[in-house]
Image: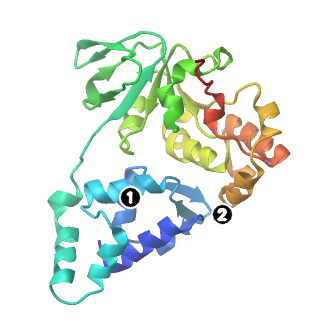
Amino acid sequence: MTLAAAKKLRELLASDKPIPLSDLPQAIFRELMEEQVVTVVQGGRTRKALYAHNKDAVINYLRNKKGIPDLDKYIDELEQPGPLRADAIAVSANSKLTRKRTFEGFLVNSVNPIEAKLNGRPLSLPPQEGTFIHIHDWAGFEIPSGIKIVGVENSEVFRYPQRLPDELNLKEALFVCRYPYSGDLVTWISRHQNQYIHFGDFDWAGMNIYLDEYKAKLGEKASLLIPDDLDMRLANASLALYNEQLHLRKKLEDIQDADAIRLYQLLLKHRRVLEQEIYVKKKKV
C-alpha cells in the first residue's frame, strides 16, 4: 500500500462522512469493497462515495490481511528515509501476506433445531448457548429449502436470537453474521433458493448496507425486516443519531425496493433512527 493510499485510508477512518470514490483510486480500496469492509453509497445520480460503516472491521482487515497493526505508525515509517521506509514497503509489497485469507466463511446460529449438512454430512443446529458455529467450508454448507436466512449486524442480536419477540416471526430461521467481513456469505446465499431477510439497524447506514451489499446482489430473494411496531418505536428513538447519519440518506427516487422505501418514509416521518438491539429482551434473573 502506497503512502498516498495509506493517508486516504486514514482520512476515511477519521471521517464520519463518505469520501468520493474518485478520490480513492488505489487497489486497496477495491479490496475493501470486495471484502465488504466498507460500503459504497450514492452521492448523486452518477457520483458514488465510500463509507466506513464499521471502522473496527477496517482495522482488523489491515491487521489480519495486510500485516499493518498500526496505520499511523505505518504512515510514519513510509515518510521516513532509510531502513524504516524499506521495511514498510516490504510489508506492503509482500503479495503472500496481503492476499492471504485468515478465515473464510461466516458464523451461524438458530433458535429452533435445524438439520443442516456440511460437505454431505449431518450438522445439527443450534449450538450450545454461548457458542456459535463458524462455517469455514461454506461451499459445502446446506440447509432445508424452507428455512429463512436472517442476516444481522449486531453481536447481541446474533448471540441471543431466542430473546427476540415472537411477533417478528424469526424462530424458524438460520441467523447469519458475516465474519470476518468477506463476500462469502452473499455468495453462499445467492447459490440457494432460501429467502434472505435483512435485520439491520433502522437508520440510514443500515439501509445502505441492505441496498448496496445484499439487495443489489440478491435481487428479489432479499427483503428488509420492518417490524409492525417500528412506527411506534421510532417516535421515541434517537434524534442525535439521525442527524449524525443524515449525510448517508439516499435520494428517494434512486431506491427501487419497496421495503427500503417504507423504511425511508418512516425515518423521515419521525426524524429519528433505531438500533436493532432494542428488540432483544433482557434475560429474566
Q: Nearer the viewer, mark 1 or mark 2?
A: 1
Please tell me which residue is depicted at 40% across the width and 57% down the height of the picture.
58
The image shows residue 19, relative to residue 172, as above or below, that is below
Q: Nearer the viewer, residue 250 or 256?
A: 250
The image shows residue 114, relative to residue 148, as above or below, that is above
Crowd band around label 2 with a 10 angstrom C-alpha radius: few (<14), some (14–19), many (20+): few
Q: Is residue 236 visible?
A: yes
Where's residue 121, x and y in %? 22, 13
Q: Is residue 74 left or right of residue 111?
A: left
Q: Is residue 24 visible?
A: no
Crowd band around label 1 with a 10 angstrom C-alpha radius: few (<14), some (14–19), many (20+): some
The amino acid marked with disc number 1 is: Ile
Asked where in the image residue 80 lies, by quadrant, the reply is bottom left
Please tell me which residue is depicted at 44% across the width and 14% down the height of the picture.
145
**Label number found at residue 245:** none
**Label number found at residue 59:** 1
Quarter of the figure with the C terminus: top right
Q: Secondary structure at mark 1?
A: helix
Q: Nearer the viewer, residue 68 or 209?
A: 68
The residue sitting at the front extreme is 285
Q: Nearer the viewer, residue 134 or 21?
A: 134
- Which residue is labeled 2 in the image? 44
Dot placed on the residue nearer the N-terminal end, 1 or 2: 2
The amino acid marked with disc number 2 is: Gly
Please tell me which residue is depicted at 60% across the width and 45% down the height of the picture.
206
Q: Nearer the viewer, residue 78 or 194?
A: 78
Q: Is residue 194 left or right of residue 104?
A: right
Quarter of the figure with the N terminus: bottom left
- In three-dimensional space, the C-alpha distance between marks 1 and 2, rounded to whole angstroms, equals 28 Å
Where's residue 266, x and y in %? 79, 40
Please tell me which residue is depicted at 44% across the width and 29% down the height of the picture.
176
Where's residue 212, x and y in %? 54, 47
